[in-house]
Image (spheres, helix red, strand yellow):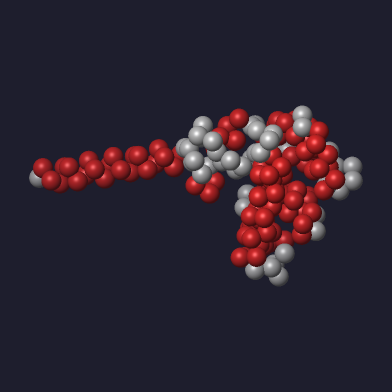
Amino acid sequence: MKSVICSVAFVACFSLSTSVLAQGRGQAGGPPAGHGGGIGHAANTRTETKANIGQKITEHPKLASKLQSLLPAGTNLDAAASGFKNMGQFVAAVHVSHNLNIPFDQLKEKMVTDHKSLGGAIHELKPDMTKDVADSEAQKAVTQAKEETKSQS
C-alpha cells in the first residue's frame, strides 16, 4: 500500500512540475520566461503587447525603414504589425512575404486570424510547396528576423 501511495505521489508531482515548466515556455520549446527568450518566446510576449509592436519598431528607424521597404508601398507599420504575437513574428512574416512573393495581408490573415504557424501559412498559400520546404522558408525568415531585431531588444 505504501508503495502505491508513493507511486501516485511521484506521478502527481511529476505531472505538476511538467505542467508548470510548459507554461513558462514559448513556442518551439524555448527557455522559460525571463530567461533570455528569443523571438517568439514567452519573454517577448509578456513585454510586448500586441498594441505596441508597431510602436516599438518605429522607435528603431533603421529597422522600420528596412521593413517598410519590404512591404507594399504606403503600408502603415503600426497597422501591419497589429495582431502579431511579438515583433519577431511580425518581422519574420514580412520577410516571408517578400522572399516568396506572398501578399502580406494574406499571410497575416493566416497567421493572426486563422492562428497558423508561419510554415503552415506558407504551405496553405503556396500549396505546391511541400511542408518541409515551407518550414525551411519559415526558418530562414525567422533567422533573418533574429538578426535584424537582436540589437533592438
Vertical side of 83 occupied by 107: above or below:
below
Looking at this view, name the residue that lies furthest to the left.
Answer: 1
Asked whether, in this view, residue 116 is left or right of residue 31, the answer is right
Image quadrant in which you'd find residue 74: top right
Q: Can residue 71 be seen in this view?
A: yes
- Front residue of 121/39: it is 39
Residue at point 68% right, 59% down? Answer: 137
Quadrant, the N terminus: top left
- Front residue of 110/81: it is 81
Image quadrant in which you'd find residue 98: bottom right
Quadrant, the C terminus: top right
Q: Position of residue 62 (x, y in %)?
A: 80, 36
Vertical side of 130 occupied by 74: above or below:
above
Residue at point 60% right, 43% down? Answer: 40
Asked whether, in this view, residue 48 is left or right of residue 35, the answer is right
Q: Is residue 90 visible?
A: no
Residue at point 35% right, 39% down? Answer: 17
Image quadrant in which you'd find residue 41: top right
Q: Position of residue 20 (x, y in %)?
A: 40, 38
